Image: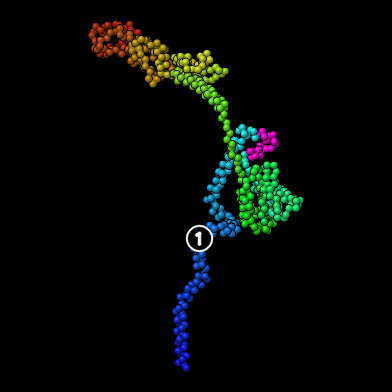
């Protein structure tokens, strides 16, 4: 009996060992799985691997994830700003600058477009017609422009709480607008009046109101109503757009709509959706046939006449300017002013007497008769080398055998002249305008020629002293001593070196 129990026990141990060997791998895997579930760090690592792709796939399917995360993200941003506004400002700094510049650029672009449009409407023939129509009908010019320029334009959008009739949000595309709360209350009152007065079924609602050129379209949803004010003919698909916007507002703010407590600040979030409704369509400009044969002929004749007149005026002005420019370039003439008075031309300036007369410069190309030109030219001495030299010859009374030259303000005399002329020219040369110095070293005293000196003798007269150097015969020496006494300007004769 005891042996049997031992055998049974051994068998049980073997079975347990076998079970352990068989189940050990699975038990180890189960233990690892349990550890992964219990270890938050491992679980976070695995979740971080799949979370980006999961978010990407969810975003591709629909916007449910973005809408679900939006309140949390908004609250987190608010908490971050409340806690530390500096950090939030630093984070936004790289994008706020370009965004602000772009916003300013777009604003200026819209202002310029609006200004161009206003100028076009104000100063064109069509704009004048519209102004007359505005005066005749008593409407404002902007209303007439809008009526004639647009097929339709959504001017205002109202978001109204269905249950209370309160105005939740309002956007407008015009400057002169009525009180939004009053208009919203009017819509609700009209709708209630229609239902009460005409026994309309409870679920039926007012869908549009027509007032002259304005149409009010209302679109209902379970919790809110959108009302838009359109000027012109509304497009067919505009209600579909209103329904879509209502669906978006209900999806994003359903809880706020259901629990509305009178605070409309919550619905600033819906403003971008409402602004999508502010659409318009401009009229296409009609192609009007303007160029009839008669108008074309008239324009052609006008162009020919204007072209001829412009060419004649240009030629007249050009020829006159050329003449005035010739006067300005003429040596010895300085023009200070040219003016016209009743068809008569007056030229004022300065003139050197040695220059040519203006009448000598005038030719047949000048378009003004000589009698219609008056010259007021005052006397002056021009510092023109040619005129300075002429003036020097006239003042010095240059003898036939003397030639004068001028270079850089220096007057040089060469040739043969009397001693008396030499003395006079030295004194007078200093008084001539434009002459800085005078050189007469090249002038030979004509009076010394009476001595008839041989080629071996050199005569020099300076400061009244006549000096003779070289070689000469005794006879000529005696002759010279006698003859020199008759020469004017020689005060002393020196032949010691002869």
| Residue ID at (47%, 82%) | 16
* Range drawn in magenta: 131-148
| Residue 33 visible in the displayed image | yes
Residue 334, position in %: x, y?
48, 19
| Residue ID at (37%, 12%) | 422
Front one among 106 and 100: 106
Quadrant of the rendered image containing residue 173: top right
Q: Quadrant of the C terminus?
A: top left
| Residue ID at (37%, 15%) | 404
Q: Residue furthest bottom?
A: 1
| Residue 79 visible in the displayed image | no
Front one among 246 and 365: 246
Front one among 455 and 479: 455
Residue named by callout 1:
53
Q: Is residue 369 above or below residue 281?
A: above
Q: Residues within 10 Å of mark 1 (few under 14, many from 20)?
A: few
Q: Residue furthest right?
A: 197
Q: Magenta: predominant secondary structure element? A: helix
Residue 25 in magenta stretch: no
Q: Element type at marker 1?
A: helix
Residue 5, position in %: x, y?
47, 90
| Residue ID at (52%, 22%) | 308
Q: Is residue 347 above or below residue 80?
A: above
* Apparent side of residue 396 relative to residue 370 in the rendered image (left or right): left
Residue 147 in magenta stretch: yes
């Amino acid at each position: 009996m005891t042996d049997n129990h031992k055998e049974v026990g051994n068998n049980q141990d073997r079975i347990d060992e076998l079970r352990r060997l068989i189940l050990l791998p699975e038990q180890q895997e189960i233990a690892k799985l349990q550890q992964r579930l219990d270890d938050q760090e491992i679980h976070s690592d695995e979740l971080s691997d799949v979370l980006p792709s999961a978010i990407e796939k969810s975003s591709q399917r629909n916007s449910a994830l973005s809408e679900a995360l939006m309140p949390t993200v908004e609250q987190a941003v608010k908490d971050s700003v409340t806690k530390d506004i500096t950090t939030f400002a630093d984070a936004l700094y790289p994008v706020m600058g370009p965004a602000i510049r772009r916003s300013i650029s777009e604003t200026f672009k819209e202002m310029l477009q609006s200004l161009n449009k206003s100028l076009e409407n104000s100063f064109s023939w069509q704009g004048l017609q519209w102004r007359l129509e505005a005066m005749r009908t008593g409407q404002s010019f902007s209303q007439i422009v809008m009526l004639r320029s647009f097929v339709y334009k959504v001017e205002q959008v109202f978001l109204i709480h269905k249950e209370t009739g309160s105005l939740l949000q309002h956007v407008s595309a015009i400057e002169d607008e009525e009180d939004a709360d009053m208009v919203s209350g009017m819509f609700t009152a009209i709708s209630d009046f229609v239902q009460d007065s005409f026994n309309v079924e409870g679920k039926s609602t007012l869908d549009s109101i027509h007032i002259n050129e304005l149409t009010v379209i209302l679109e209902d949803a379970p919790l809110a109503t959108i009302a838009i004010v359109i000027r012109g003919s509304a497009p067919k698909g505009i209600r579909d757009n209103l329904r879509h916007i209502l669906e978006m507002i209900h999806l994003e703010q359903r809880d706020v709509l259901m629990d509305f407590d009178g605070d409309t600040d919550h619905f600033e979030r819906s403003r971008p959706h409402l602004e999508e409704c502010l659409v318009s369509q401009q009229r296409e400009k009609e192609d009007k046939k303007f160029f009839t044969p008669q108008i074309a002929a008239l324009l052609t004749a006008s162009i020919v006449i204007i072209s001829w007149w412009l060419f004649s005026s240009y030629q007249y002005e050009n020829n006159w300017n050329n003449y005035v420019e010739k006067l300005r370039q003429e040596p010895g003439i300085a023009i200070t002013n040219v003016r016209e008075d009743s068809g008569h031309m007056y030229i004022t300036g300065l003139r050197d007497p040695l220059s040519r007369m203006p009448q000598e410069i005038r030719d047949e190309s000048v378009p003004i008769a000589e009698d219609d030109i008056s010259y007021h030219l005052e006397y002056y001495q021009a510092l023109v080398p040619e005129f300075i030299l002429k003036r020097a010859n006239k003042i010095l009374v240059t003898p036939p055998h003397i030639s004068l030259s001028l270079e850089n303000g220096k007057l040089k005399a060469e040739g043969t002249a009397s001693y008396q002329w030499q003395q006079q020219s030295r004194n007078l040369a200093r008084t001539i305008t434009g002459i800085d110095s005078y050189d007469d070293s090249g002038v030979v005293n004509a009076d010394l020629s009476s001595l008839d000196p041989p080629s071996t003798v050199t005569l020099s007269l300076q400061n009244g002293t006549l000096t003779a150097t070289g070689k000469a015969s005794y006879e000529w020496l005696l002759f010279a001593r006698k003859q020199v006494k008759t020469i004017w300007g020689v005060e002393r004769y020196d032949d010691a070196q002869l």
